[in-house]
Amino acid sequence: MLTGESLPVDKSAGDAVYAATVNANGSLKVRADKIGKDTVLSNIIRVVEQAQGSKAPIQRLADQISGIFVPIVVGIAIVTFLIWYFLVAPGDFGAALTSTIAVLVIACPCALGLATPTSIMAGSGRAAEQGVLFKTAESLETTKHIDTIVLDKTGTITNGKPVVTDFIPVPDVDAEQVKRLVASAESESEHPVAQAIADFGAAGLAVTGFEAVPGHGIKAHVDGQDVWIGNRRLLDGITVDEQAAERLEQDGKTAMFIAIDGKYAGLIAVADTIKDSAKAAVEEMKRMGLRVVMLTGDQQRTADAIARQVGIDEVVAGVLPAEKAGHVAKLQEQGRKVAMAGDGLNDAPALATADIGMAMGTGTAIAMEAADITLMQGDLMRVADAVRMSRLTVRNIKQNLFWALAYNSVGIPIAAAGFLAPWLAGAAMAFSSVSVVMNALRLQRVKLNK
C-alpha cells in the first residue's frame, strides 16, 4: 500500500509493518512503534497539506492587460474630447461628446473580459468529455508549462494486479493437466499470486493436505498427486530449469517451479502487466517534448523491467511516500516544471508537491484529493491529452487577447477622428465579442488521442 510494490513482500522478525496493509500468510505479533501524529499515514497527510499550501496563485494575463488598457482608453477619451472641443470644432459640445462616446464604446473591454473564461470553459469542457477533469482554471493554465512527467508504476503504468504471463511445462507432461493441478492447489490460498494462478487454470480438482510455506510456496495433495509450487528452496533436491527462471526474473516477473510427485513439471511466472496504452502514451509524451521519469517504491529490477517495456529511460525505485515528494522537489529545483501522475495513497505527497498532480480515477480518494487533475479512465494516454489540451487552450486565450487588442488599436483612432458613429461603434464592439466566443468554441472540435 505504501511502497507501490505489485507483489507481496516477505517479512521476518524485526521488520517494520504498516497499518492497513494485508498479512497474506500465517499470524503476526506486532508492536506499535508510532501512534497518532507520528504514524506514516499522518506524515503523508502533513506533507500533502504543506505542499498544497505552498502553491502560489497564477496572475491572470487578461487582468494585467485590462489594468493597463482601461486607464489608457479613459485618457484617450478625455484627450479626444478636449481636441474636438477646443481645436477641431471649437465650442461644439455635441460633436466632441459624440467622438468621445465612440472611443469609449469601441474600446469597451468586453472581448478582453471574455477572452480567458470562454476559452477555459470550452477547453475544460472538451477535456472532460475525454475523461480529463481539471479542478481549477489555474490547473488548466499551468499544465501548459509542464516539461517533465513523473509516473508512478503500479496502477499507473501497470494494471496493479498480478496475472500469469508465462507457463512453461516440461515436454513430456500433459500441460493441461498440470495447469489444472496447479490452479486447484493455488485456489486454496488467499495470496494474490495464488489467486492469479487459480484464475489462469481450470480449478476444481479435490485438494487435501494444503500447506502454505511462508516465503517458499505451497504444498498440496491434489487428485491423488503431490503438487509443490514455489521457489528454489521449496524444491530443494529437485533439478529445475534455472536458466528459464532467470530470464523471466530479469523481466521483473516472479517465477515459480512446479513439482508433481517429486518430479519437476515446469514453471509458471506471474507479473503485474503494463496497461495496453502505456507504451504508446510514453511515446506520445516524448514526441511532445516531455521528459518522462518513473518513480516507484517497487524494487529496482522490477521497475527497470517495466521501464524497458514502455520506453522510459529514467527510473527511480525503492522510494517511500515522503521520498517521492523529495524527488519531485529536486526536479523543480533544477528549473523543471513537473507533473506527477499516480493513483495510490503513497503518491499523494508527490501529487501535491508537483506543479501539477494527475490522479488516476481508478485510484484512491486521497490521491484524487491531492491532485489538480483527475484522469477518469485511468488511461495513461490521458496524461498527454491533459498537457495538449492545456497548450491549445492557452494558445486560444492568447489569440483572443491579441485580436481583441488589435481590434481596439485600429478602432480607437478611427473613432477619435470622428469617422465612427456611437451606434456603429457599439455594433463593432459586439461583433468583436462574438468573434472571441467563436474562436474559443473551436476548442470543442479538438481531437484527442484514442
Image (cartoon, grey):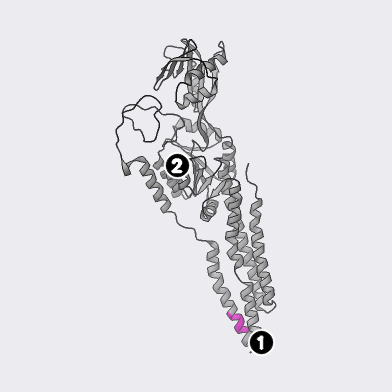
Name the residue at 65% across, 81% down: 98
Residue 305 position, x and y percent, is: 51, 31
Q: Position of residue 158 (x, y in %)?
A: 52, 34
| Quadrant (top left, top right, bottom left, bottom right) of the C terminus | top right
Query: Which disc is residue 89 wearing?
Result: 1
* Left/right of residue 217 with respect to residue 105 in the rendered view: left
Instruction: State which quarter of the image contains the N terminus.
Output: top left
**Which residue is nearer to you in this view: 313 or 232?**
232
- The secondary structure type at the circle numbered 2 is helix
Mark 2 → mark 1, Cα distance in angstroms: 71 Å
Location of residue 216 in the rendering, given as x and y in whole percent from the top left corner: 41, 20
| Mark before the other along the chain sequence, 2 or 1 | 1
Residue 391 can be seen in this image: no
Q: Would residue 215 be counted in the magenta stretch?
A: no
The number of numbered discs placed on residues in the rendered structure image is: 2
Q: What type is the residue that disc 1 sits on? A: Ala
Mark 2 surroundings within 10 Å by alpha-carbon count, few (fewer than 14), some (14 through 19), many (20 or more): many
* Residue type highlighted by circle 2: Asp
Q: Residue at x 63, y 76 (%)?
A: 103
Residue that badge 2 annotates: 347
Circle 2 or circle 1, nearest the eye:
2
Per the rendered image, the range of residues in magenta is 78-83
Q: In which quarter of the image is residue 424?
A: bottom right
